Image (cartoon, rainbow, N blue to C red):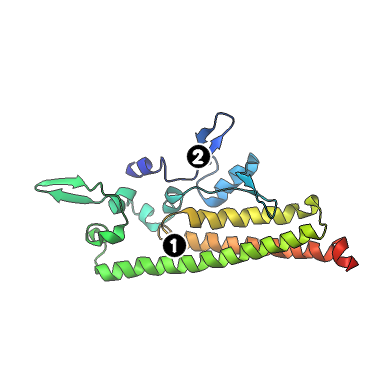
Amino acid sequence: MRSYVCAQCHVEYYFKGEGKYLTFPWDNGISVDSIEAYYDEIQFADFKHAESGAPIIKVQHPEFELWSTGVHARSNVSCADCHLPYKREGAIKITDHWIRTPLENISNTCLTCHRESEEEMKSRVLEIQDKTYHSLKRAEIAIIQALDAIKLAINSGVTDKELEQARQLHRKAQIRWDFISAENSMGFHSPQESARILADAIDYARQAELTAFKLLAKSPITNKK
């Protein structure tokens, strides 16, 4: 229940209808795949991508959703346990309301459960974040190259109808990249899920690129040249 307080804001959401009613896209579940399925069902997009023409979802900051898939959530460790740990003032035990990264207060956060040294715990966190960042950059490169291929196809006379699949693949890659990019733990809240999501982002981006190149090869302008 303590984490639901944080989940009022640290989540993915959108503004529904003309009244802009704040809505969580969780009807199908809280994974990125479930959120994507919800948006697909209602045909929602935050904007049309200026280069690819794909209907894009702009992810907010899904800390709660990603944390929910990780080992800390399964172990009943709440957001507050790490970001607002308990401290003592005299004989009183209170919550520290200085919200910050647990790495700034490892002795009162990580070491209340883990028995390793502060240096070891910090090293574990940074290793996860470095590996996540590496995959995030690879996903960015894949998406950029997909965009380049789609732009070439557009400039070669490929029609909107023909480009529909490539654009949907771009949409799928983009929401997954943004899910990890916009989430503020750089993968730490759920390392394996983050790796899965970014692997799928890279895959969908490469599929979009390949689809666009296949269309490009068949385009009238390309064949004329």
Q: Can you see residue 186?
A: yes
- Which disc, if any, is residue 19? none
The residue tagged with tag 2: helix, strand or loop? loop
Residue that numbered label 2 is attached to: 24
> Is 8 on the left or on the right of 169, as rendered?
left
Residue closer to the observer: 217 or 194: 217
Point out residue 34 in the picture as x, y percentages from the top left corner.
56, 47
Point out residue 216 in the picture as x, y percentages from the top left corner.
80, 63
The amino acid at mark 1 is Pro
Q: Tell which residue pokes out farthest to the top in this image.
A: 19
- Which disc, if any, is residue 191? 1
Residue closer to the observer: 9 or 52: 52
Point out residue 211 in the picture as x, y percentages from the top left corner.
74, 62
Query: Between marks 2 and 1, how big is the CA–CA gap?
Result: 23 Å
> Is 96 on the left or on the right of 7, as rendered?
left
Question: At 31% across and 67% down in the image, what residue appears?
Answer: 122
The quadrant holding residue 43 is: top right
Question: At 35% across and 40% down in the image, what residue appears?
Answer: 5
Q: Quadrant of the N terminus?
A: top left
Point out residue 76 in the picture as x, y percentages from the top left corner.
33, 51
Q: Residues within 10 Å of mark 2 (few under 14, many from 20)?
A: some
The residue tagged with tag 1: helix, strand or loop? helix
Question: At 78% across and 59% down in the image, what residue appears?
Answer: 155
The amino acid at mark 2 is Phe
